[in-house]
Image: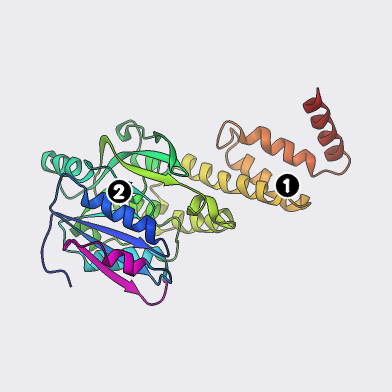
Amino acid sequence: MISNSPFFSVVISTKNRAELVCKAIKSVLKQTFDDFEVVVIDNASIDNTQRQIELIKDERVFYFKNEIDRERCFARNRGISLSKGKYVCFLDSDDEYLPIHLQTLYNAILKAEEKVSLFFTNAYETYNFENLQERICPDIEKYNVFEYILTYTFNPARVAIERTILTKFQFDEQIPGLEDLDLWLRIASKYPIQQIKERTILYHIHDESYSVSAPDRFERELKMFYYVFSKPELKEILPEKPKKRLLSMCHYKLSLTLNNRFSPFRIHYHILKAFFLYPEGYNDKANKTMLVIFLDQIPLIGYLSKKIRLLKSMV
């Protein structure tokens, strides 16, 4: 067990990402604020993750390994239980803190009237570790807090949570992939959510990211959204429109994945569900794309539609 009581505990879950997790750890060690510990939970890696982390000689880094991979929700919960900080932060093994991250959080926490809160900063993002840009991070004060979380869910690297909150709320291990959205919603039902305007982390989207690499992501997410929305503590307080937008998005994405094979009934079902849940389309392109896919799956009409598009592209 960890014996000291730092201001921040940074919990990192990882599996088979030796190079990336070491980069993430080093981004914490480069912080201008130094009262922290790093708790790394290794989800049964079979690469050289353990060896590479052991080469990082810093007494603030603590390494624990799960002999069986029980997903990142379990790993994060274990990291919380092993940590000692007044505030708990998170960092995915493929993301990074900018050097000012913890100092920015610390300054904001000292100034905050309600210190028993979830604090989150804004972020930059990259695609395949290139093309740095500002992540969309609107002002939370202009929204209902639940609408904001459902629409602009902030990833765990941006967050610091006062410890007593995490004695009452933990990541739900039944919904890997939506565990952060679910936890933020449940915390928001009881505690303040405070945004810090500075951009202090790098969120990397790449070919191995969950959001990119999981082939059955949207089928699983659809089930998990219904599960989250039906929780007794959330059922009556979540606004309908952003809920329907997320469900519509899943049905739309499912129609795209099914479009690679001729499956008209299933595709038409998902397109119609997407449309009636959120008629304006979850984004600006969804309805036009769904109409094209819908027509393409109708015999003869689909053939003619494809021929017309092909001829137009040749002009």
Q: In what quadrant of the picture does the C terminus appear? A: top right
In this rendering, the answer to whether 172 lies above or below 304 is below
Query: Horizontal and vertical percent for residue 101?
Result: 23, 43
Is residue 190 visible from the viewing direction of this image? no
Query: Which residue occupies 40% across, 72% down?
Result: 44
Q: Residue at label 1?
A: 268
User: Could you tell me the amino acid type at mark 2?
Assistant: Ala
In the rendered structure, which segment of residues is drawn in magenta? Answer: 49-69
Report the front residue among 18 and 242. 18
Residue 188: numbered disc: 2
Label 1 Cα crowd, 10 Å radius (few <14 / some 14-19 / many 20+): some
Instruction: Name the residue rendered at 55%, 34% in the picture.
Output: 283
Residue 252, x across and y down, in percent: 62, 44
Position of the N terminus, as image quadrant, is bottom left
Q: Residue 39: within the magenta?
A: no
- Residue found at x 32% / y 49%: 157
Q: How many marks?
A: 2
Instruction: Report helix, strand or loop for mark 1.
Output: helix
Image height of 231 relative to 146, above or below: below
Farthest residue to the top: give it: 315
Does the magenta run of residues contain 55?
yes
Coloring scheme used: rainbow
Q: Relative to 77, is 86 on the left or the right? A: left
Determine the image quadrant of residue 16. Answer: bottom left
Residue projecting furthest to the bottom: 67
Q: Position of residue 139 (x, y in %)?
A: 32, 32
Question: Dots 1 and 2: beta carbons under 8 Å?
Answer: no
Give the residue at x 83% y 39%.
Answer: 302
- Does residue 93 appear to the left or right of 224 in the view shown? left
- Point out the tag, 1 or 2, that comes first from the N-terminus: 2
Q: Is residue 94 left or right of residue 290?
A: left
Res. 210 mark: none
